[in-house]
Amino acid sequence: MARLVFYHHPQAENFSLKFSSAALADIRSQREQSDEPTKLIGYPFETPVYVLYEGDTEVEAAQDIDFDREWLSDRIHDLPRAGQVVAFRLVELLEAAVDVREADEFRLYKEFEPQKIQQALDHVSWGASVPEVAGEVMSNLILRHSLPNANHRTGIAMLQFCIESVDSDFSMPRTHVDDDTWREWVDPYIVDSKRIITVRRNNLRFKKLEELDIDLVERKDGIQIRLAEFELDMHWRDALSEYAEQYESHCTNFAQAVLQRAERDDLLAQQGPAKHEFITYLEDGLVERDFREMC
């Protein structure tokens, strides 16, 4: 039977795996050194494995934040215009996702980090093919994880807007059944997306688990990561770069799948938007859009 440990603590999903050892004394030492709240699980394998989980932040309900213009303006006033426009639309999409669900059920796992939005825009190959630009917009926004939740939904929405900025008549195929369930053709992309992202941030932690004969790591959403399928033995900086490249390719493939499913093969090789074209579309082309229909 495969040996499995959880990446997120089963009773506290804002606590994630930080350290593992076969020696309880090592775990206790790490716990004493941590400045964050911690939780410990001992996995009763034939040779026990102990995992220390650390809480990154308090989980908030979306109802605890008022997403008004003043709240947003305070956080984006230092960004260039492009970053401000994208940040504004991302927060609108986040608000729509909250509206679709009960606000007290929608959890916020981190602070809003708008400066990462500008970083994402600075690393897009503007003017490349439509799927390349759309895929890079999606991958860069998701990897930088600027929002406190809904990064995949908002990333896919930005991919859609990127395509629409080239052809406003583009009709996006439905990506989810309801607010909890992705459509069958989308789900494999989301599952692999979360696997790649998790490995990218944790290659050395997962390498240690592999050395402890752990086969699987399971995320809070039930997604399992089979460690043998990933290259873990590299410096963490190399892992960030290596898996970012893989993720960019993954999102570009998703963009191609979107176009093919929409029967728009004519856009596969077409030149994608320049940065200013994308920003202008976000600013002027979405004025009457009801983003709740996308969430």
Image (spheres, rainbow, N blue to C red):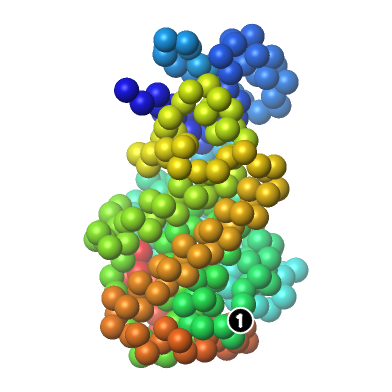
Q: Is residue 105 left or right of residue 78?
A: left
Up/down of 152 relative to 262, above or below: above
- Taking depth in this image into account, of 58 and 182 the one nearest to the observer is 182
Q: Residue furthest right?
A: 78
Q: Residue at x 28, y 70 (%)?
A: 174
Q: Residues within 10 Å of mark 1 (few under 14, many from 20)?
A: many
Q: Which residue is mark 1?
A: 126
Q: Nearer the viewer, residue 46 or 5?
A: 46
Of residues 49 and 8, the one nearer the viewer is 49
Q: Amino acid at mark 1?
A: Trp
User: Percent from the top left, x then y, of residue 143?
Assistant: 57, 57
**The C terminus - image quarter:** bottom left
Q: Position of residue 59 (x, y in %)?
A: 51, 39
Q: Secondary structure at mark 1?
A: loop
Figure quadrant of the N terminus: top left
In percent of width and height, residue 170 lies at 36, 86
| In-image side of 195 versus 266 (left or right) | right
Q: How many marks?
A: 1
Residue at 32% from the left image edge and 62% from the top image edge: 186
Residue 109 is situated, as x and y percent measured from the top left of the image, at 52, 45
Q: Let me know if residue 116 appears in the view.
A: yes
Asked whether residue 154 is in view, the answer is: no
* Image height of 145 relative to 256, above or below: above
From what the image shows, is residue 69 above or below residue 144? below
Q: Is residue 243 above or below residue 16?
A: below
* Residue at point 55%, 86% (across, down): 273
- Towards the viewer: 161 or 272: 272
Residue at image position (45%, 50%) is 194
